[in-house]
Amino acid sequence: MLANPAPGPAGRSTHPGRTNVGALAPAASALLGVALLTGCSSGITESVSTAVKDSSSAVATARIALRQDMAGKLTRAATSTTLDDGLKELQSSRSTVLKLSPVTTVDRGTQRQALDALDQCAAGFATARAALAAGDGGTPSLADGDKALADAQDVLKQLESTVASP
Amino acid sequence: MTAQPGPLRPAPKVAGRILDAQLHLLDRQVLDHDGVPVTTVDDLELAGPAVDDAIEPGTPAPVLSALLTGPVLGTRVFGGRPPSSRLIRIPWKDVAEVGVVVRLGVSGESLDAGWVERWVRDKIIARIPGGRHDPR
Amino acid sequence: MKRLLRVALGILTAIGGFVDIGDLVTNAVVGSRFGLSLVWVVALGVLGICLFANMSGRVAAASGRATFEVIRERLGARAGLANLAASFLINLMTVTAEIGGVALALQLASSVYYLLWIPVAALAVWLVVWRVRFSIMENVTGLLGLTLVIFAVALFLLKPDWGSLAGQLTPAVPEQETVWTYSYYAIALFGAAMTPYEVFFFSSGAVEEGWTVKDLLQERINVLVGFPLGGLLSVSIAACAAVVLLPAGISVTSLSQVILPVAEGAGKIGLALVLLGIVAATFGAALETTLSSGYTLAQFFGWSWGKFRRPAEAARFHLSMIVCLLAGIAVLATGVDPVLVTEYSVVFSAIALPLTYLPILIVANDPQYMREHVNGRVVNALGMVYLVIILVASIAAIPLMIVTGAGA
Amino acid sequence: MILGDLLGNTVQDADGGWLGRVADVRFALDGTAHQLMAEPRLLGLVISPHSAASFLGYERNGLTRPWLLARMLRWRHRGAFLVLWEDIAVVGAGSVRLRPGYTRYSTALQDAAEA
C-alpha cells in the first residue's frame, strides 16, 4: 500500500464542504496526487465522516423530538416513530463503519473511536426509548434521555473535528 | 436520370380521398360503433402480388384488405412476423370512418380483436363483487 | 354562483392535489440541506407543469384523446413502447412510494409499524378505484390534502428571521455541499414538480369528466391558479425544514423529520393536521398514479378504459391496476425504504420527461386534433424553451446520480 | 403482404442505386364504394433518402408550428419524394426496386386542408 498515514493534507482535502470549484482548479493536480498517495486512508476518513454526519443528524432529530414531547407538542406515537427512525439511521451508519477494513494504525484508531461514539449514541437512544416507555414520572425521565443524547452529541462533535483535521 | 432540380411536380390528382398509412392509420385508436375502444391499428394487410415476384406492368395495385392487431405489434417493434394464421384481422369493410380515430360500423363484441378483453372480463373482473356496478 | 363554486372547488382540489410524496420528501430534503437556494427550481417546475398540463388538457378537451393515445400515435409503435416501458416503471415506483407514504404517515399517527399498514392502504386504494365516482374521489382527497397548508401556517408561527430567509433565495451552493449535489437535487426537484403522471392523469381525467372546449376556461383557471399555489405549499415545506432542521444539522432521511417543524410551530393540532394532510395527499396521489398506470397501458394498447365505465366494460384496465397494486405491495414487503424509492422515482421522472412532453407539444399544434384551439405563439415559444430544459435535465440526471452517489 | 414488410425497406433504382427507404405508403380511396368506405388502393410509396423514422405528423400536411421543431423534422426528411405503384418493379423482403425512368412526385397531400 502506498498509504501515507501521516496527518497530511489528505485529511483536509476530504474535509466535508468548503469545496469551491473555482479555487479547486489550480490546485487540482496537486490534490489528485496526494489523494492517490493516501487513497486508502482518505477512503476510511470519508466513510467515517459520512457516518458521523448521518448519526449526528439522527441524534439531533431525536433531541428535537424529545424536547417537543416534553413541551407537549408531539404525540407519543410520533415521538416513538421518530426515535425508531433515528435508531435505524444510526444502526446503518454503525454497520458501515464496522465493515471498513483499515490498514494503518491511525485508521484502526479512527474506526475504533467512531464505533465507541456510535455505541454511545445507541445507548442514548436506548435511554430515550426507555423514558418514553416509562411514561410521565417514570425512570428514566425524558430529561434523562435528552441528557444521554446530548452527551452522545458532544462525543460525535469531538470525533467530527478529529476526523476532519487530525 | 429522373432526379429533377427544383420543386417536384405534384402527384396526379385522384378522385377519392388520400390516406397515408403512417400518417393516418397506423397506431390510431380503433373505436366500435358505440364509441368503445377496441384496439389500435398495429399493422395493415394488403391483398396483392406476392413478395419477391416481378410486377408486370399494368398489374392492379394491392388493396388494403384489413387492419391488423395482436401479436403483430410485437413483431413490428422487435422484428420478424407472425404466421398468417396468428394475425387478428379487422376487415376493411367494417371500417366506417377514418379521422383522428378509426371508427368501425360494427359492435366490438363480435370481433376477434376483442377476445382477450372478453376473457378477462368474464373470467376475472365480472366475478369480483361490484364488477358490473355502474359508477355513475 | 354555482359556477363560481365550481371554479373555487376546482382551484382548491388543484392545490390540495398538487403535493405528493415526491414533493414532500424532496422539498424537505432540499430545505434541510440547501435552505431556500433551490426555490427557483420549484418555480421553474411549476411553470412547466402549468404549461404542459394545460396543453394536454386542451388536447383532451378539443379532441377527446388522452395523452398516451397521442404519444403512441405520434411517436409510433417503437418509440411509443420505449416510452411506455419507462413511464410505466416510473409510475409503478411512484405508486409504491405513495402507498409507502400513506403507511409511514399512519405509523406516525398510530405507532403501528408501517409495514402492517401497507396492505390496508393498498386495499383502500383499490376499493376507491373500483367503486368511487371520479369526481368524488378527486374532490375529497383534494380538499383534505389542503390541510397541508399547515406547513405555511407553521412557518409563520415559527417566527423566522424573514430577512435571512429571503436572503437564501438567491441560487448559491451552500458551503457544506458541492456543485454536483446541488445540481442533482435541482433535477430531483424539477422531476418532482413535473412528474409525467400528473399529465397522464390530468388529460385522462378530462376525458373521464367529459370536458369539452366549453370547459377550457375553467381548466385554465384550475391550472394557472391552483398549481402555483400548490407550488407555494411545496416551498413552505422546504422553508419549514430550512428554519428548524438546517440549523440543527439535520438532513432529512425519513418522513418523521418532515413533520417536526410543523409540531415545533403549531404543536399537537398542527401535528394532527399535517398527518391528515400527508395521508390525504399521498392517498390521493396513490389513486392518481394507480389510475395512471392503467391509463398509460390501456391508451397505448387501445383497450377500453375509464372509471366512468363499469369495471366489466374496462376489464383489462382494471386488471392491470390490480396487478400494479400487488406489485407495489410486493416491493414494499421487501422492507425497502419508501423515502428512498421516492427519491429515486423523482429523478427517473426527470429522465423520462422529454418523451412525454414532445408529442403533446406537437399535437397541440395539429389542427386535425385541435381545430382552432391550437397553441399560440407565446405558448409554443415557452414550450420549446421547456423542451430544451427538460432535455438537459434528462441527459444530466444519470451522470449526476453516479457522481454524487444519488445525492449522498 | 403486411405493411410492416414494406415500411423501412431500402429502395433502389433499376440499376441498383440507393435512393432511400420507404417512409410511408400512400393509399387512394377511389375504388367502388359498395361498403362503408371505398376500398383503399395502393397509390405509391413515400421515399425518404435520409431517414425512415416517423415524420411525427410534419411535412405533407403543411404543419409549421412550433417553427423550430417543424424546421428540424423537415430537414431530416429533405428530398423525400413519392413514386407511384406503376413505377415499382419488385417488392422483395427488405427492399424495393423501381422501374427504369420512374418519376418523382411531390409528397404533399392534395387534400391537406381538409385532412
Image (cartoon, coloured by chain):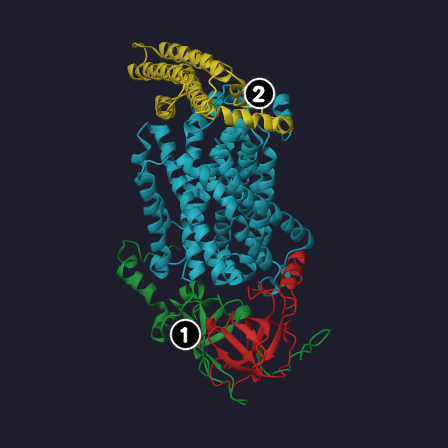
Q: Where is residue A14 in the image (x, y as percent from the top left)?
A: 52, 23
Q: Residue at x 41, y 40 (%)?
A: C98
Q: How many marks?
A: 2
Q: Mark 1 lies on which chain?
A: B
Looking at this view, is C106 or D16 the one in front? Answer: D16
Q: Position of residue A68 (x, y in %)?
A: 43, 17
Q: Which residue is drawn at 54% across and 24% down?
A: A34
Mark 2 secondary-structure assignment: loop
Kind of residue indicated by mark 2:
Pro
Tell me if residue B48 comes above or below residue C29 in the rendering: below
Mark 2 or 1, closer to the camera: 1
Label 1 crowd bin: few (<14), some (14–19), many (20+), radius 10 Å: many
Q: Residue C160 carries which label?
A: 2
Q: Which residue is drawn at 48% across and 48% down?
A: C197
Name the tint of chain A in the rendering: yellow
Which chain is drawn using red? Answer: D
Q: How far apart are marks 2 and 1 (CA)?
A: 67 Å
Residue position for label 1:
B90
Tell me if residue A39 comes above or below residue B42 in the rendering: above
Tell me if residue C162 comes above or below residue B52 in the rendering: above
Q: Which residue is drawn at 38% across and 42% down?
A: C96
Kind of residue indicated by mark 1:
Ile
Name the tint of chain B in the rendering: green
Looking at this view, is A151 or C156 the one in front? Answer: A151
Mark yes or no: residue C12 visible.
no
Say whether mark 1 and mark 2 are on the same chain.
Answer: no
Which chain is drawn using cyan? Answer: C
